[in-house]
Image: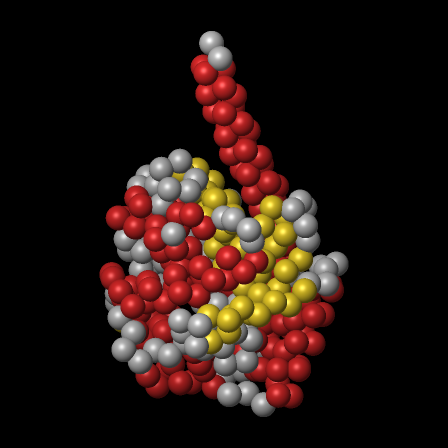
Amino acid sequence: MKPESHEQRYREAERAMWNHHGMEPHERWVEVDALGLRVRALEHGEGRPVLFVHGTPTAGGVFVPLVGQLSGVRAIVVDRPGCGLSEPLDFAGLSPERMRAVIEAWMAPLITAVADGPVDVVASSAGGLAALVLAARRPDLVSTLALLGAPAVQGMSLPVWMRAATFAPVARAVARHHVNERDLRRSFKTMGHGALVRNGGLSKADLEWRYALSRDTNTYAHEMQLMRLAATWRGPRARWVASSTEIESVQAPTLWVAGENDPFATPDRVRSWAAHARGSTVRVMAGAGHQPWIDRPAEHARLLDAWWKNLGAGALEQEEHRHTRRHA
């Protein structure tokens, strides 16, 4: 557990990043009684409720550049359990089946606490796994699902540095290390964001938040424990990631955004996953990496807005068609 002074330092870096993007979010805590922990989310804006679920090892703040470009949205940016300031999971006895129950156990009360009905979900990487699992198990809670970058699905690859973290000594070293600028530049390149590094695409405030996440929270230590459960040197353990059966069970319309340079999955692999989903749409972002929205957040905001509007128009057309048939 980090000292209270670390939490304050993290909050200051997080607040500076949100302010840099012109926002002042509201903090919300949700009690997850089934797991004996609290989950934290930051909310901003008004409009359709959209839940943002991040990957690993990071926290909800990774979506801030995208949220800053969206309009007509009430963004609910969650820190997954053990990440950012959310309280950690107990990994004792955690199995693939239990992991899925845990996902539902924290996501369902979060959604019911922040919205009167189902929400749109935007997720990435390990957050994509959580979103797919929830959408398959609780279709009543998910209106639409947008997967930005390769989600954790059977057939995904892991970069060498993530596979190395499945070894205990490496995992401990990663958890203790404080990320610096050189580390981030190397990580961004590995994740397919070379152009972002060359162009200086992230602000100083965004970078300082990432340093603080490593230095002042237990995120990396928590996520390295999860990594060792879910993967080996060869890659993800099959039952610890989403299956094609789970994708087929998702009733909500899905948007799959593939980064051209995403090392976790090629655009063709993403298309093959999307083929299992009903009502799926695939978009490939040229020159983008595993977190494609950080390369061009405004473009992603336009893509999401257009997709949501088109889905709404389609639903309206279906309703008008049914109305016409009833009165013909």
Question: Residue 242, position in %: x, y?
Answer: 31, 56
Of all residues, the one furthest to the bottom in this rendering is 3
Q: Give the residue drawn at x 57%, y 70%.
A: 29
Q: Position of residue 2 (x, y in %)?
A: 55, 87
Q: Quadrant of residue 264?
A: bottom left
Q: Position of residue 195 (x, y in %)?
A: 57, 56
Q: In this view, does 28 lie to the left or right of 167?
A: right
Depicted 240 relative to depicted 275: above or below: below
Can you say whether 269 is above or below 51 in the image? above
| Side (left or right) of 85 relative to 152 | right
Residue at 45% x, 50% y is 141
Can residue 23 be seen here? The reply is: yes
Question: Looking at the image, what colour scheme do you see?
Answer: secondary structure
On screen, residue 192 above or below 222:
above
Which residue shows up at 45% across the image and 14% down it? 325
Nearer the observer, 180 or 110: 110
Q: In which quarter of the image is residue 313?
A: top right
Which residue, as the protein is rendered here, is positioned at the far top? 328
User: Is the residue 220 above or below the residue 5 in the image?
Assistant: above
Q: Where is residue 191 in the image (x, y as percent from the top left)?
A: 46, 61
- Is residue 223 visible in the rendered image? The answer is no
Query: Of 303 and 113, which appears nearest the observer?
Result: 113
